[in-house]
Amino acid sequence: MNILLILAHPDKKSFNHAIANECKKVLIENGHTVIFHDLYDEGFDPIICTEEIPKDGKIPDLVNQHCDDLIISDGIIIVHPNWWGQPPAILKGWIDRIIRPGIAYNFIEGDEGEGVPVGLLKSKTGIVFNTSNTNEKREKEVFGDPLETIWKNCIFDLCGVKQFERKTFGIVVTSSLEQRQQWLRETREIIYRQFPIS
């Protein structure tokens, strides 16, 4: 299987990088092909221009390559920190530019974009790994866990990816080495379960 792995964290020493590396390792062990994009390392430009917005808009070669990678993917894994209840701006820009009409979803003929989109993605499974410095109870009770809504309802389900799993690791800032090692074991278990040996 082709698995698209998107990483959005600027610090190469971050736990997000450790999660992404663990994902890559397990996927390769299980015989999958990993399509990996470290958005900060690649210098991905998150700013969408007017010409790109229409379904038939003109898109740069790099955006086209990311779209092609999304189209051929059998599964998608996203790794990012929780910043203000949202993905980092670079990842939000990736969503804006890559989760495009005609690529990830369409509207039914004659709908003119007013109704419910029809998902186009080949991927059956989407996984999101988040890191956080907010207590889980507070995240859910005070903030309403906005990342769950964004990824599950507003992106994956809308684009036809019906099997969804999200795991948040926290609190990272005060975590011990032993705790982070346990989180990596949990990451490994999730990847083994969702993308077993091919």
Image (spheres, helix red, strand yellow):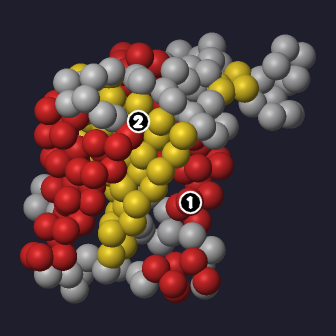
Residue 112 position, x and y percent, is 85, 24
Say which quadrant the N terminus sits in. Answer: top left
85 or 153, nearer to the observer = 153
Residue 3 position, x and y percent, is 33, 29
Residue 121 position, x and y percent, is 55, 24
Residue 32 position, x and y percent, is 24, 25
Kindly state the secondary structure of the residue where label 1 is placed.
helix
Q: Name the residue under label 2.
A: 76
The kind of residue on which mark 1 rests is: Glu
Mark-to-mark CA distance, 2 and 1: 16 Å
Q: Residue at x 61, y 83 (%)?
A: 141
Q: Mark 1 points at which residue?
A: 148
Q: Residue at x 52, y 79 (%)?
A: 139
Is residue 197 positioned above or below 122 on the image?
below
Location of residue 168 (image quadrant)? bottom left
Can residue 133 be seen in the rendering of this structure? yes
Kindly state the secondary structure of the residue where label 2 is placed.
strand
Mark 1 neighbour density, 10 Å: few (under 14) some (14–19) many (20 or more): some
Say which quadrant the C terminus sits in. Answer: top left
Q: Residue at x 14, y 33 (%)?
A: 29
103 or 51, nearer to the observer = 103
The kind of residue on which mark 2 rests is: Ile
